[in-house]
Image (tube, rainbow, N blue to C red):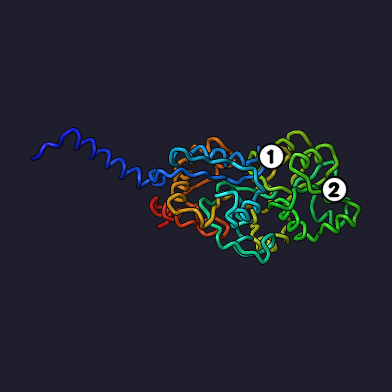
């Protein structure tokens, strides 16, 4: 038997490690071509901004040397989808399954504007809920009470660039309340940023605020801990209308927030990571692998990610098709049979 020289042995070992490297998350890194990725989230300090920042720390090491990932505080669920659809400014972003459903079907916020280039890398990162928050001082105990008594209420919402505003509108409408009704009954509807919304609820200038939340949501946690608030349920007759447009029933567990001793029956959605068909398959594969294989680390860092289960999350993308690179990873990992 021919003896292998040290040089030949070293080259063989190097080739084996290179092959292993190419078969995993290093496949794109091995191309040697640096990439600059902008990761669209929403405002600095938000749950999504924190998610994106944490994921970026796991993605950057598997990219070619000289690559960068910058988390951008862009326009949220809808804004990120629109930027990706146009292949502008961002290469991946956070959104909600509900926004994905609307975009894929061309309904509600995307009426008549389907997004055929949109693709998903990761589905169902968390479980979020559309919280319905009222001040106890307002005396509001249900949405039907507002309608039946034509109550004068002051509503705050975020600007109509994300799910918060559209979700507020469709939930109220499912209960027979329009913005015009609120104004006609002497109340008001004000679009403000999240800081101003929380402050308005604290100081009594607002009575009601609907907002997507997950466990540990920074602003709603702060509001619940500093203000006497009440969390309301979506009422039974409203669920079918909301489910039909991608807002399925969900139960927010008791004590998700202070002043919420009982479970709340609301509508839910989850965060997904999306990109577009413009992303190369190998890059999509590499980024997906980096996130999925660091799921436990992400869960330890972010309370909201405790629901993330890679074995099933890929199924729950709100109707947004998986990117082919992501699909390849899930197949190789054995999640897609």
Q: Quadrant of residue 214?
A: top right
Per the image, label 2 sits on a secondary structure element best described as: strand
- The quadrant in which the C terminus is found is bottom left
* Extreme residue toward the bottom, this view: 112
Graded by Cα atoms within 10 Å as few (under 14), some (14 to 19) or many (20 or more), the crowding at tag 2 reads many
For image coordinates 27% across by 42% down, the residue present is 16
Rendered residue at 56%/58% (across/down): 118
Q: In which quadrant will I find the N terminus? A: top left
Distance in Å between CA atoms under marks 1 and 2: 22 Å
Q: In this view, does 314 lie to the left or right of 303?
A: left
Residue carrying label 1: 257
Across and down, in percent, residue 104 comes to: 59, 62
Sequence-earlier tag: 1 or 2: 2
Image location of residue 183, percent across then percent down: 88, 55
**Depth order, front residue of 285/164:** 285
Secondary structure of the residue carrying numbered label 1: loop
The numbered disc on residue 154 is: 2
Q: Nearer the viewer, residue 247 or 282?
A: 282
């Amino acid at each position: 038997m021919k003896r292998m020289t040290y040089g030949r042995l070293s080259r063989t070992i190097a080739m084996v490690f290179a092959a292993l490297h190419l078969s995993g998350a290093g496949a794109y890194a091995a191309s040697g071509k640096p990439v600059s990725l902008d990761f669209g989230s929403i405002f600095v300090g938000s749950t999504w901004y924190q998610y994106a920042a944490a994921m970026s720390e796991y993605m950057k090491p598997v990219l070619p040397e000289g690559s960068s990932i910058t988390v951008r505080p862009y326009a949220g669920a809808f804004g990120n989808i629109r930027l990706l659809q146009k292949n502008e400014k961002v290469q991946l972003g956070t959104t909600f399954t509900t926004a994905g459903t609307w975009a894929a079907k061309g309904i509600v916020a995307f009426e008549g504007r389907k997004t055929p280039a949109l693709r998903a890398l990761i589905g169902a990162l968390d479980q979020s809920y559309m919280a319905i928050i009222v001040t106890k001082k307002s005396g509001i105990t249900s949405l039907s009470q507002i309608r039946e008594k034509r109550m004068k209420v002051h509503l705050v919402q975020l600007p109509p660039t994300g799910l918060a505003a559209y979700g507020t509108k469709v939930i109220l409408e499912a209960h027979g309340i329009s913005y015009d009704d609120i104004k006609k009954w002497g109340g008001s509807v004000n679009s403000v940023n999240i800081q101003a919304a929380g402050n308005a609820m604290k100081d009594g200038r607002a009575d009601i605020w609907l907002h997507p939340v997950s466990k540990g949501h920074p602003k709603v946690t702060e509001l619940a801990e500093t203000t006497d608030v009440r969390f309301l349920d979506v009422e039974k007759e409203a669920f079918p209308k909301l489910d039909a447009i991608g807002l399925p029933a969900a139960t927010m567990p008791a004590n998700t927030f202070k002043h919420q001793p009982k479970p709340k029956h609301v509508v839910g959605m989850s965060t997904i990571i999306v990109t577009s068909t413009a992303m190369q398959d190998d890059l999509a594969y590499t980024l997906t692998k980096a996130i999925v294989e660091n799921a436990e680390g992400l869960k330890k860092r972010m309370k909201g990610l405790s629901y993330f289960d890679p074995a099933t999350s890929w199924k729950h993308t709100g109707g947004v098709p998986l990117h082919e690179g992501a699909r390849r990873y899930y197949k190789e990992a054995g999640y897609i049979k």
